[in-house]
Image (tube, rainbow, N blue to C red):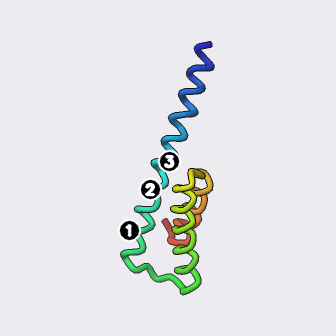
Amino acid sequence: MKNVLLLSCALVFSGAALAHGCPGEMKAIDAKLLTKPALSTADQEKVTTLRADGERLHKAGDHSASMKALADAKKVLGL
């Protein structure tokens, strides 16, 4: 019974941790964009789209998809 309770708590807290990870990732992307990185127009549009998708997915509660989109944006930015 203890193990079930501990597992349940771990799942709840890991979901909360992911939820708080999205805003941090968005801040990192925004900070990098403020430095005006040398990106092609296509890459700039891709980063902007992925950043917006990440925020939209975060607000919808799909944090794993949000983190994926934000990670893709960071990859294009070289972060």
The N terminus: image quadrant: top right
* Three-letter residue code for mark 3: Ala
Residue linked to disc 3: 19
Nearer to us of marks 1 and 3 is 3
The earlier-in-sequence mark between 1 and 3 is 3
Q: Is residue 20 above or below residue 55?
A: above
Residue linked to disc 2: 23
* Three-letter residue code for mark 2: Pro
The picture places residue 4, in percent across and down from the top left corner, at 62, 20
Does dot 2 land on a helix, a strand or a loop?
Answer: helix
**Callouts 1 and 2 close, C-beta under 8 Å:** no
> Residue lying furthest front in this view?
60
> Residue lying furthest top in this view?
1
> Residue lying furthest bottom in this view?
41
Where residue 2 is drawn, which disc sits there?
none
Residue linked to disc 1: 31
Q: Residue at x 43, y 55 (%)?
A: 24
Q: Residue at x 56, y 22 (%)?
A: 6
Q: Nearer the viewer, residue 68 or 79?
A: 68
**Figure quadrant of residue 11:** top right
The picture places residue 54, in percent across and down from the top left corner, at 55, 62
The picture places residue 62, in percent across and down from the top left corner, at 60, 52
